[in-house]
Image: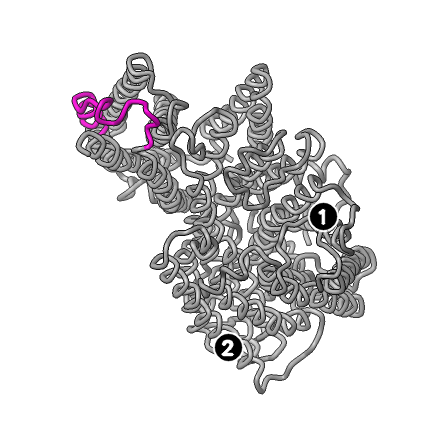
Amino acid sequence: MSQDHSLNPETMPHDPSKATTEGKHKFLGLWFFLGGETVLFACFFGTFIALRNSTAGGPTSQELFGLELVFLMTVLLLTSSLTSVYAIYHMKNNDFKKMQLWFGITALLGIGFLACELYEFAHYITEYGFTFRSSAFGSAFYTLVGFHGGHVIFGLSWLIALMVRNAKRGLNLYNAPKYNTFSLYWHFIDVVWVFIFTVVYLMGAVS
Amino acid sequence: MSIATTQKKGFGAVLWDYLTTVDHKKIGNMYIAAGAFFFLIGGLEALIIRIQLIKPENDFISAGLYNEMITMHGTTMIFFAATPILIGFMNAIMPLQIGARDVAFPFLNSLGFWLFFFGGVLLNLSWIFGGGAPDAGWTSYAPLSLQSPGHGVDFYVMGLQLSGAGTLMGGINFIVTIVTMRAPGMTYMRMPLFTWTTFVTSILILFAFPALTVGLFLLMFDRMFGSAFFDVALGGNAIIWQHLFWIFGHPEVYILILPAFGIFSEIIPAFSKKRLFGYTSMVFATFLIAFLGFMVWAHHMFTVGLGPVANAIFAVATMAIAVPTGIKIFNWLATMWGGSITINSAMLWALAFIPSFTIGGMTGVMLGAASADYQYHDTYFVVAHFHYVIVGGVVFGIFAATHYWYPKMFGRILHEGLGKLSFWLFFIGFHLTFFIQHFLGLMGMPRRYWVFLENQGLDTGNLISTIGAFLMGLGTIVVLINVVYTAVKGKKVSGDPWDARTLEWAIPSPPPEYNFKQLPLVRGLDPLWIEKTEGKGKMTPAEPVVDIHMPNGSIYPFIMTIGFFIASIGFIFQVDNNVWLLAVYFGMALALGTMVVRSLKDDHGYHIHKEDLEREAD
């Protein structure tokens, strides 16, 4: 069945991402999903905190972490969260082109973050011999930060797929909820990073 | 019934229908059928355990095989029998109880089912391909689980990971369904108790299962990729597994028991012809149990050495759970007080549940006393305790629900005589099996031991226990016979065979695919009963007959699951040979590729037109 959900200024609802039943379900469902994700990351954080001093004679967090790169990564990811807010703002104003533009910037910032993270991991492995298998600290570090990085990769693939798929057909009530749920998910990734920055890097560099 | 559905379909068409269905009722049936299948496997394993323990120093099976039996019995019963059967009933009944046409995410519902099912299949394939089943106990404590040879524990990890993901999806789905899809007038405090317990259980699933996910990932990385979470030589800490497992594991037992509480809270009022006593306190008690359920995980770890302060806190929190549970017990008793009670099979299970579960609760408080627990820990006293709550609570609940809702789900009523026979066999067998185990435990018989010596006062008790187990097996067989008999020759019934109170009885049995032709207007708690007492006898529609929007069926959930299944097998065997990494890549590509296709292809569903609906009414 073909349904014409495309929007024009007259039929434009206040918030296209929550105007349909499916949109409301997705919005709520993603919030609950993020609740579960919070427990997931809480468990990884707990594991990391328990094992962060178990270096088994290998490099410690003070020797490893350079806050300059991590600061850059934080700036990139936090900014990408802000740009996704702009994108959603333009979605609510039914300005598809500007929405795509800001989501495009979001994706670029996300890719930049990921590149820094890959460089960071490669640096630890080649310069310090600090790997997933070298100590319990290593296992916990790469698992926590790596799971976050995996979430970034998943989010980027999701965003790029959405942008390519809808590039030609514009905004409608069917795809608006998809953009909106992505944006929620992206904020969540950002919040997790704030905790990683604090618990892993700041606490690691200081203590 | 519509003309289309009464036509005979070929086997292939039926199979395709079930592989692609997104209908919550069919998915519920599949959950129950698959869960029942695993229940039989787990039951056979239990019988083998009991045969081994029938006499001192028996050599019916080897020590290694015995370890595999106890591990598989526990894992199968908890994850692949009890949980899915309850989720099946939630699927089949909860949307009907709130006056919804489906769940919020029908596609996800199907995916959740297939992930659970293939997780169970994967776990059981370990018997054939794993060089033996997992043998580190259902709790799979590190470092024992790291030392376990062969691939058994790897199958455990991947099987539980698959099914856990499926269960999590189900949980999110039910929460959103209950929040957004209640019929007009169905406020939260008018929801039937089974819907309430489904809601609270789903919240527990949402916050408990990710802890298991993390624990399984750590175990997987340690076993398959050489990480050092539990490897003390590299600074790891094996207690982390115990914490993660029980942060999940304790809420899991409430995930099992709360739906059973909900089932009894439906059956007891229906057959007492009274509204549930203390409805509000029942809802409150459910939430309190769920909340406290997250605060008590370390009572499984009293003997680990967390120290007296931690033990004391967790002991007090544990005993506090007796309060809301006690509220529930007294509410059920008060519901029956002065009621016009009908005693049939469903009600028999409910009546038997109350004292059986209370015994389990009482031993729970005993175990919660941390200092005394040093005596009980890892003895048959613990085994007796958790079988009293899980069999006496959950399994009784499942049998009660089977008798109560079978007419709604299939339009036929289970045979009453066979139902009573199965009840008495199982009920007597249950107490025979497990009551004596309290005393075996107090006399010092440790759990998980392959043999015991003669003349230590354990011989007679174990013999009695084994006899009881066979009676339970017999009772289960009678239930099966009853189901088969009913499917073939059972009496057909109307939509409301019990003269019951809640919304699911206001529609035909079995319900049409759209459930409610017109969404009903709910005017209070027990909405159908209100209409009956006020002389109308049926629900007032809240809307005119309009087109009904339905989701399309889809084969994608099945394909995604196959992808993850193949990848899981790849993960297990890549330890031996890197070629298996190809299976990982292929499986993940298949699963993720299907996800992309699902995401990019528009799927607007279809409509059942109002003209067809009006025609069907005739």
Secondary structure of the residue carrying tag 1 is: helix
Residue corresponding to mark 2: B331
Local packing at callout 2 (Cα closer than 10 Å; few below 14, some 14-19, many 20+) is some
Q: Where is residue B15 in the image (x, y as percent from the top left)?
A: 71, 38
**Badge count:** 2
User: Which of labels 1 and 2 is toward the front?
Assistant: 1
Residue A80 shows up from this direction: yes
User: On the rendered structure, is B55 left or right of B190?
Assistant: right
In depth, the one of A21 and B437 nearer the eye is B437
Q: Which of marks 1 and 2 is nearer the N terminus?
A: 1
Residue A94 shows up from this direction: no
Chain of the residue under the numbered disc 1 shown in the image: B
The residue at 56%/55% (across/down) is: B378
In the rendered structure, are the residues bearing label 1 and label 2 in contact, judged by CB atoms less than 8 Å apart? no
Secondary structure of the residue carrying tag 2 is: helix
The residue at 59%/55% (across/down) is: B86
Q: Does the magenta stretch include residue B91?
A: no
Residue corresponding to mark 1: B45
Q: Which amino acid does label 1 sit on?
A: Glu
Same-chain check, marks 1 and 2: yes
Local packing at callout 1 (Cα closer than 10 Å; few below 14, some 14-19, many 20+) is many
The overriding secondary structure of the stretch rendered in magenta is helix
**What separation in Å lies between label 1 and label 2 (alpha carbons)?**
37 Å
Q: What stretch is highlighted in magenta?
A: A54-77
Q: Where is residue B605 in the image (x, y as percent from the top left)?
A: 52, 39
Q: Where is residue A195 in the image (x, y as percent from the top left)?
A: 25, 37
Numbered badge on residue B496: none
Examine the rendered structure and indicate whether residue A206 appears above or below residue B306. Answer: above
Q: Does the magenta stretch include residue A65?
A: yes
Q: Which amino acid does label 2 sit on?
A: Asn
Examine the rendered structure and indicate whether residue B186 appears above or below residue B294. Answer: below
Figure quadrant of residue B154: top right
